[in-house]
Image: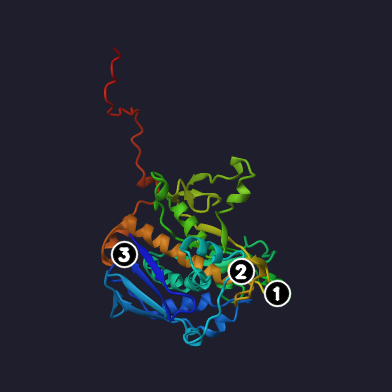
Amino acid sequence: MLRFLTAGESHGPCLTAILEGMPAGLPLTREAIDRDLARRQVAYGAGGRMKIEKDRVSLTAGVVAGQTTGAPIALTIANRDYQAWQAKSIPPLTVPRPGHADLTGAIKYGYRDLRLALERASARETAARVAVGALCKCLLAEFGITIGSYVTMIGGVSAGDLGHLTYRERFALAEQNDVRCPDVTALEAMHRRIREIMQARDTAGGLFEVVALDVPPGLGSHVQWDRRLSARLLGALASIHAIKGVEIGDAFAHAARPGTEVHDEIFLAEDGSLTRGSNRAGGFEGGITTGQPIVLRAAMKPISTTLNPRRSVDLASGAEAVTVYERSDFSAAPRAAVVGEAMVAFVLADALLEKLGGDSLAEMRPRGAALRQSRLADLPMDNVPWQFAYLLAAAETQP
């Protein structure tokens, strides 16, 4: 139902995104998008590029008088750093940096200068994703769905137990500091670790969680592999630069536990609702939403660009060489968490449109209100014996 494309290079004039499939009649403001763009730029340990850019979006199609029209939405974000690059004589880049798309991009496309891979593979592209995700958040908000994120580990320094905090409290606390960690007792240790990394001319990875609240049950499907909403979300988060692992709930820890300690038992409440005593499944069963919070966790590797040179080969001469430093973050997990929100928002907005249908918000609203819930009254059972009775061709007789 929804799809988007981005275009633009890291040091080109601008980033462009086109979002197609958004229903008509959705109220939008530039401020809602710019707010998330600003959040993406904040992180302790961010590189110098974030001191240059002041990301603002321009909506040049598909939004008229503050409302979507149902036509494709075009967004642009200017690259302020382009002013310093447009007339610059750019030295050749022929030594591929380990961990980047330099070498693989040259193999794939036959580039004769590695910067052509660097420019498009850069995480600068995620600004366009965040703008698209902010639009999708506006649609989800119309149906009461909230998405937030927070960091739980940077460079081996982990937050403490967050079980005493609600997800909304975690979201709010994360917005109050520059590592996006809701555990305020871990902030100084995280800052200290990032300073150590910077002094060592190195980089740090991290873990972050993205959580979606009040998502209705029944989104996604178990009937085909590519319709499992859980799989679509895992893939969307894994598509973010430097993300090397994603899980739903505590999936990796659950792999070591017996099933009786993993699955969420079902209970009948007095009001007829079917409830769970836990949410170990992270909001999914069979690739379909349960109505509980969707909890996703992503692992970000340390950024590949380090001030300490790495060994490589000069493709121009064939000689052994070391890498040349390109400006980069020392720790990017806090910024990546905001990108994660955007990707989750896009996938959930797509799933909601798939479930509800409709070309306008006015058509979607009554369908959203009529969705089947996890209630006994919504799930009548025939409770009678039955047979498969497939319509099979008669078996061929043997000669």
- Expressed as whole percent of the image width and height from the top left, the position of residue 265 reads 53, 44
Q: What SS does tag 1 mark?
A: loop
Q: Earlier in the sequence, mark 2 or mark 3?
A: 3
Determine whether 122 is above or below 371 in the image: below
Front position in the image: 316 or 365: 316
Determine whether 84 is above or below 374 in the image: below
- Residue under label 2, please give it: 317
- Expressed as whole percent of the image width and height from the top left, the position of residue 358 reads 27, 61
Report the residue that reaches farthest toward the top. 399
Q: Is residue 299 left or right of residue 129?
A: right
Separation of residues labelled 1 and 2 (CA atoms): 28 Å
Q: Nearer the viewer, mark 3 or mark 1?
A: 1
Determine whether 58 is above or below 394 in the image: below
How crowded is the residue under tag 3: few (<14 C-alpha within 10 Å), some, or many (20+)?
A: some
Front position in the image: 319 or 306: 319
Q: Quadrant of residue 69?
A: bottom left
- Residue under label 1, please give it: 201
Q: What SS does tag 2 mark?
A: loop
Q: Quadrant of residue 371?
A: bottom left
- Residue under label 3, please give it: 21
Kind of residue sitting beneath label 2: Ser
- Expressed as whole percent of the image width and height from the top left, the position of residue 331 reads 63, 72
Determine whether 89 is above or below 128 in the image: below
Separation of residues labelled 2 and 3 (CA atoms): 49 Å
Q: Is residue 54 left or right of residue 191?
A: left
Q: Which mark is residue 240?
A: none
Circles 2 and 3, Cβ within 8 Å, touching? The answer is no
